[in-house]
Structures are given as C-alpha cells and as structure tokens.
Amino acid sequence: MKTSSSPWIRSFTFLLFLLSSTPFKASAQDNRCFLIGGGSAETFFVSENATVGSVIGVLRIAGDPSADGDITMRLEASNETVVSIDTHTKNLTLIKALDKEGLTGPAQVMTRITCERRGPNAELSLTIPVNIRVTDANDNSPIFRNSTYFINISESTMVGSVVLQGIQALDADQPGPYSTVQYSILPGPYSDVLAFTSSLEGTLVLKKAVDYETLKHFKIAIRAQDQGQPPLYTDAVVSIEINDSDDQNPLFGQSRYWAHLPQPARKGTGLEIRPEPMRAVDQDAGINASIRYAWNAGGAEYQDFFLDPLNGSVSLNRNLEDNELVQPVILVVKAHQVDNLDRYALTTLTVSRSWSFSPQLQYLQRRYSVQVLENVPVDTIILAMAINKPIDQSIRFVMENHNGTEQAFSVDKTGEIKLERTLDYETQMTHQFIVWVTDGLTNDTATVEVTVLDVNDWDPRFELAEYEFIVKESALPVGSVIGHIQVDDGDAADRVTLQLKGSESRAFNVHDNGDVVFSDPSALNSTVVHLMVVARDSGIPPRQASVPVKINLPVDFLMMNGSGITLSTADGSGLLLIILGILLGILSLIISGLAVYLCQYKRKKTQPSPLTVVQPQPKVGVSGLYSGDTSTPITATLRRIPINPLARPSCRRVVPIQSPTLVPVQNSPPPPPMPPPTPPPRQQTASNSPHKISSSGGSNNNEESPMSQQQQHRTFLSSSQPTAWPTDASLPRRVKKLSWEDEFNVFF
C-alpha cells in the first residue's frame, strides 16, 4: 500500500514546495475612474428648494482628485449647466435653482463627468453619466381663480340652499399633500351666515336666514391652504348682495287717522285727514309694489264716503244734512299690494263734525265689541280705541283689573288693545274689561268685550282603543242595545256624530250618544262581526277619528234571527263551507260510481271460458304416450283463463293446460311401430317436463305451450303401466308451437 501511493504523495509535496518557494505577486487591478460599488451612472435626488451654492452630492468615483492625486475630473460643458465640480474634490455644487414644476428652473438634470487617470494607464479615461432628479417641495401657495366672488341672495332663500358653486384654488405643486387644497371661512362679521359644504369642495351654502330690511350687503373672507408643513395659503373675498322678496306687508304712516266734515258737507268735497294724508308703502323696499286702497267693510256709514283707490284720499259721496252724522264714525281702510292681494295693512279713519268735539276728554264709543279667534298669535292688536282729542303725551290709557283680564290683554299709550297671552275658547269664551283714558284734567271710560271664537284644534277621542261586545241571547229583537261607545271632543262647541262602517254595518246602528243598536238581521252572514266606528266633529275644518269594534254573536244567532244562513262560523265562512261540502259530495258520488264500474268489469273479465285449441279434431290419438300401451289414444281438452288487458306483458301469466282426459278410441287401427326415442340426458320431474300434444290429422291447430314452475298446471297421464317412451306411435309432421303472441291475439 505504501509502495503504490508514495510516488503520488512525493509529486504533490514537490508541487506545494514549488508554489510556496516561488514568490506569488497578484497584480492589483487598476479601478480608478470606476464607480465605487459598481454601476455605470450616478444618480442624485435633490429637493427643489435647495439653495444655490450648496453641495448636492459627492461622486462615488474611485481615485484621488486632489492636486497630488491620481485622477482628474471635469464636467461636460453645456449652456444649461446647473451643477459644478469643486476643484480637486468630488463634490457637486448647485449653481442654478431647481424647480420640480419647471417654472423657475429645470425639473431634471442630465450631465456627464469625464474622469482621466494620471500616471500609469494615463491614456485611459471614462465618461460617467450623472442624473440629478428634483423632488417636490411645498413652494407654491394655492391661487384662487378669482380674487373676489359676488353672490346675489334672495332674503326668501331657505337655509341649507346652495348659494355659490365653483370656488376653486389651484396649487402648482405636484399631486399630493402639497397640492391638496382645503377651504374655510375666516372668522369675522357675518362669518356664520355662509358655510362650505366640505373643506375639500368650494361650494357655499346658506347657514343662517337673511333679511333685506336689516342687512342688504356684507362680505366674508375665505381661505384656501394646502397640507404642507407649514401650510401655504391664499385669501379671497366673497361679496354678498341680499335681494328683497315680498315678505313684508304694506305699512301706513299712522296707526289711526281722523277728519272733520267740511261745512257745508257737499258731494265731492274732500276730507282733510290728520295728522297727515293717509298713505301706505310696501315695506319691501327692493320691490316697492304699487298700493291700492279700499274700504274693509260694507256698512251703511261707508256709503257716504268715497275712497280713492290710487292715493287714499277720502271725499263725500253725497250731500249730508246737519242732522246727519251727529256721532263720529270709524271707517276701516285696507291697503293691499297690486301684485299680491295677501299682502295688506289696515288702519282706521274717524270722521266727525267739528262741533262734536267737546273740550272734555271722552271716548267716541262707550262700548266696544270685538271677536278674536283663539289661535291668534300673541302681540296682535285686536282693537284701537278712539277719543275726541288728538293723542299726545298728556293722554294716558289704563286698563281696569277685572278677574285677571289684564294678564290676557294690554293697552298702550295710543289706545290700542294688544293680546298678551294665547286665548282658549274651552277655558273662557268671553272677556270683558274697562279701559280708562285721562289727560290729567278729565277722564272717561269705555267697556271692551272680547268674544273668543272657537278653532277646531282637537280630534274626537274615544275612551278605549278597541271595543268588543259579546251578545249572549240567541234571539235578539231589533232595536236592542248591545253596547255603548264613549267619545269626547276637546272643543267644547263641537258636536260629535258617529257612523258605522264595514261589510256588515247595515246589521247595526250607532247613535250619537254612543249606543250600538241591533237593526237588521238579514245583513248578517257571520257570528263574529268586525266594524269601524268613525267619529266626526262639527268644527271648521271638521276632524275625525275611528276605533275598531268587534261583536261576538252566539253560534245559533243567525238561525234564531232569520238571517237565512243555517251555518255560522267564527270566521264568517259558513256559505263557503256549504259550497265546499256540496262539491265534496259530488266528488264522492263520482268516485263511488267509478269503483262500482271497475268491480263489475273485473268480475266479468275473471269468468273462465273453455277454449279448444286442438282443432279440427277434438280427439288426439297418441299411441302409448308415456306408456307402453299403444291401443289407447288420448283426447285432451284445453281451458284458458283470460288475461287482464291492463296488465303489463311481463306480468301476464302462462296459460295453464288442464289435465287431458283419456278416452279410448274405437275402431282405430294401431299406429305403425316406431323405434323408441333416445331418452333425455337428464331425468326431469313432472313439474318441469315439457309435453307436446299432437294430432294425427291436424297440422295448424297443434300448439307447444311453454311451462313454468310457478304459473303452469302440469299434465299427467293415468296409466297402469310404467312410464315409457312410445315405441309404435309417431308424432305428426306439423306441430304448431303455442306462444305469447297467440294468447295475445286470442284475448285482444
């Protein structure tokens, strides 16, 4: 083993000695001007807000670019030089501003640097591409498309309505948070009137109702700012003009006017109205609709005066004698807008003779009556009291306390009666009080009676949410009361009427006092009646309410009361059950008749009928069949059972063959002898052995019947001799085989 491997070991040892003794000097690779870490290009990412003169990166070029170094680098000259290389360094210095958007500077810089080697291999130089990519900075503020926005808003605009769309501010920064603009309203006067639907959408909506009469014009400041850190923003102004709408009634210059009859009082003479001409103006100054004047009533006293519909002046309509119009009259004047008759104002004009004025202060009427709806709002002026002197600072009106009436009404310094709290007709229908007037020297009193008019503000109310009445008597006379329904109305003056509704409502009647009365038994078809009672009051407008009513009647109630229906059910379906019972009876008769027919048909088909299938001769002579006796022929009679024609072919039974009757045949010559047949290879029992019946004279009437262990009766021959094959008998030449087709043809 040692002698065979020692030469190889000595050779390997010698080789190692040579390698170790020979000085190995790996020549180092000259990688100057190559990129440290590999690669073929240099890439720098610089923010667009980098200042000019700053170092944006250091080149990863292998070698020393210093004065005593081994490489020299220079930048490729270009007219659009953005960076420079510091002398004897690898630093890139920015010499021109950058801009990601490309507006004020380049958005990307592509340049090349040439690196040359010094010393060995000086002839080799490399050019390295330098890619300077500018990154975005938040250096642009959002700018509104318009510095000022103008809006016209009607004072009738609903709160929540959009009043201005399309406010937009654009940010020049790249898509992202620096260019995402948010809108807001700066705090200040009227800043709560409008609002942005979303901070990211420039849509303004009305947040607070405006009124032209109180505010015609206002401005708000809006701001658009980005999402930078810190954010940059721009402000704009929204100027809003409020447009007047027809939401104010006309207004008279005075709450009351008076005039003296001229002397003489002739037709066409104008009245001098004081304290100023009677005029009304539209309070909607922006619309300033035209006004028309008219009398607000049509009494006899109005016939004596003519009111000019255009200017509101009043003149005499006829000549008045001195004995006429002795007492002052108060005329009510109505001023309405031409374009909207629902906008109107009322005032009073008191007309009297000059001599009717007494130096003593007194009311022109001693008693005032006024009717007021109970739903009239508080602070409504319901009456203006008139005196015989002009109202000045010396005149004073005082209401006399009477059962707390002063809490519901008040009188001001001009004699106007004002409503102080809500009236209720059901609590108090009339109010009566006395009003004093004084000028410091004399005084007078007048009685005021206020009649409260009812307003239908209550629905009829039932005592129960549902009524159920149980009738125990089977025989109930017409007119009997079966129950009572209690209903009330909060309006004292309203009268409530009741009415029944439902499919069987004619069977009963309900009185206004709530009694439910049995009225018509012929209208009933069920022992459980569901009705609806509707209560309706007499208010204006009328109100109504309803309640369900259930009436339970005895089972024999309909029969006892002659309703014509003898079957009652709890669910009202007696007639339906009768019809259903008749139909079931008819169906039962049909089924019974069909069953009888089928039974008769089956009985008829199952009767046996003898059929002779051995033709033309009823006798079959077989000499010594299964017997050694050749002198006794056999006559067989075949009887078949009819097959059900409705049965399937696979279910049909094999026609059994009746045992043949052995009849001796007289004067028949014995058949010629024949050799015995070869016995079968296997002995079969009588239950499964096939038999052939032959006829000496028939060729077409013989049949071969297939035998079945379960379905066929076997044919046995009676013989005293032992069973043996015939020796002297011969089978007929032509034998017809019995088959299912023949049986089928027989019965069908």
Image (spheres, rainbow, N blue to C red):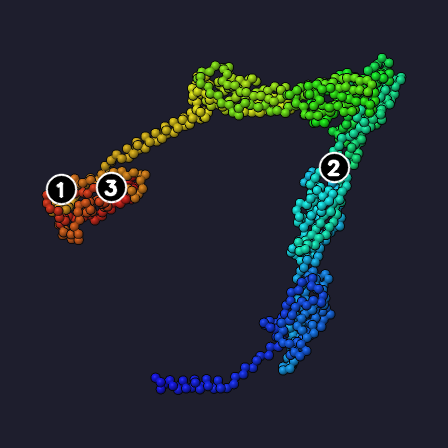
Q: Residues within 10 Å of mark 2 (few under 14, many from 20)?
A: some
Look at label 2 and name its amino acid. Answer: Asp
Q: CA distance from mark 2 to mark 1?
A: 135 Å
- Give the amino acid type for the residue marked by disc 3 in the picture: Val
Sequence-first disc among 3 and 2: 2
Judged by depth in the image, the label closer to the viewer, 2 or 1, is 2
Checking the image for residue 655, the label placed there is: 3
Residue 724: x percent and y percent? 13, 48
Q: How far across and how far down the image is residue 260, in percent?
A: 86, 20
Give the label, 3 or 2, closer to the camera: 2
Relative height, residue 163 to residue 363 (above, below): below
Is 558 drawn above or below residue 291 in the view shown? above
Q: Position of residue 361 (x, y in %)?
A: 82, 18
Image position of 490 with respect to 746: above or below: above
Residue on which disc 1 sits: 718
* Mark 1 crowdedness (10 Å alpha carbons): few <14, some 14-19, many ≥20: few
Mark 3–mark 2 Cα distance, whole angstroms, equals 114 Å
Residue 211, labelled with which disc?
2
